[in-house]
Amino acid sequence: QVQLVESGGGLVQPGGSLRLSCAASGFTFSVYRMSWYRQGPGKERELVARIIGPDITNYADSVKGRFTISRDNARNTVYLQMNSLKPEDTAVYYCNAAMGRYDYWGQGTQVTVSS
């Protein structure tokens, strides 16, 4: 069955870095658009970054220049490198795979940015 398993979240100080991973299985990873979303406390879920194909990427304005999304089709994994983290980046981060009517979500991983 389809699985998206996120990892790499945790507690980090402001200015620090984290790398999130999302391991996918159960579908043809390479043809799917892969995205990271996040949902902060009391906020709606929002798109953070998206990768279409090997190197077409989109980012939310709030993370441009700080976050980088990448994918390894050989490992069926998508990554989110997060640098210069701010307290407002605190959220549960979700991995998403989408293609046409197919739309899959991971369980989420908590990222907390606090001193």
Image (cartoon, rainbow, N blue to C red):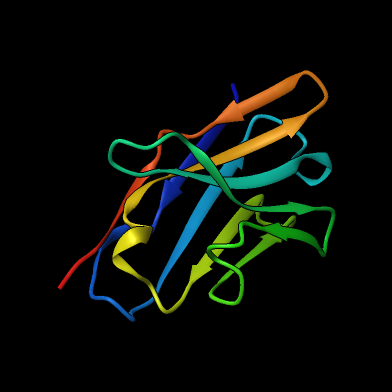
In the image, 62 versus 19, the foreground residue is 62
Which of the image's four quarters has the N terminus? top right
Q: Residue at x 54, y 65 (%)?
A: 63
The quadrant in which residue 95 appears is: top right
Q: Is residue 98 above or below residue 6?
A: above
In the image, 10 versus 64, the foreground residue is 64
Q: Residue furthest left?
A: 115
Residue 26: percent from left, percent from top: 65, 29
- Image position of 10 (left or right of 63): left
- Image position of 110 (left or right of 75): left
- Image position of 77 (left or right of 38): right
The quadrant in which residue 17 appears is: bottom left
Q: Residue at x 29, y 35 (%)?
A: 42
The quadrant in which residue 71 appears is: bottom right
Q: Residue at x 72, y 32 (%)?
A: 98
Residue 59: percent from left, percent from top: 66, 59
Residue 87: percent from left, percent from top: 29, 64
In the image, 58 versus 96, the foreground residue is 58
Which of the image's four quarters has the C terminus? bottom left
Total numbered badges shown on the rendered structure = 0
Q: Is residue 61 above or below residue 91?
A: below
In the image, 115 versus 102, the foreground residue is 115
Q: Residue at x 78, y 39 (%)?
A: 32
Residue 5: percent from left, percent from top: 47, 41
Q: Is residue 35 above or below residue 87?
A: above
